[in-house]
Amino acid sequence: MKSPRVGDNVRVVRTPDALPSMLADTRKALESIVGYVFPVKGIGRYGQLELMVGSVVDPLIGGFMNTVWIEPDCVVVVNQ
C-alpha cells in the first residue's frame, strides 16, 4: 500500500484508536469525515497527516477551514 505524501488525495476509512479519549468536538469531526476524500496538506513530525476538512466539519461544529491531524493507517491513498 502506498504511503500518503503531501498533495495526495486520501479517503478516511476509519477513526483513530484514541477516539474515545478525545474531546467531543474532535470526536464528532473525526467521525464525520469517514468515507470522504481530502488532500494531504502536511505531514507531522510523527507521521500524522494534516487534512483540511472544513467542507464537511465546519457546518457540524462551527469554525472556518477546520483541519484534523490523523494517523496514516486511518486513510487510503486514492487516485483522483
Image: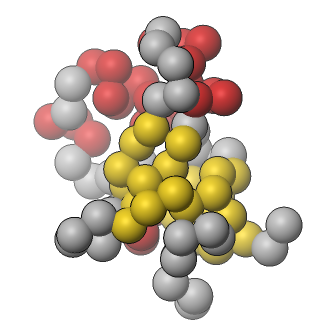
Identify the residue at the far left of this view. Answer: 21
Q: Is residue 7 above or below residue 37?
A: below
Residue closer to the observer: 28 or 65: 65
- 67 shown above or below 48: above
* Total labels drawn: 0
Report whether residue 7 is seen.
yes
Q: Which quarter shows the C terminus?
A: bottom right
Residue 60, percent from left and from top: 54, 13
Residue 56: x, y in percent? 63, 28
Give residue 33's quadrant in the image: top right
Could you tell me which residue is drawn at 60 percent across and 12 percent down?
A: 59
Of the 4 image quadrants, the one containing the N terminus is bottom right
Relative to 23, 43 lies left or right:
right
How far across and down, in percent of the image, does residue 12 sit?
Answer: 57, 54
Determine the image quadrant of residue 39.
bottom right
**Residue at point 50% right, 49% down?**
51
Question: Residue 77 vs residue 66: left or right?
Answer: right
13 displayed left or right of 45: right
User: Left or right of 64: which side holds 9?
Assistant: right
Using the image, determine if residue 28 lies above or below residue 1: above
The residue under the point 22% across, 70% down is 45
The image's colour scheme reads secondary structure
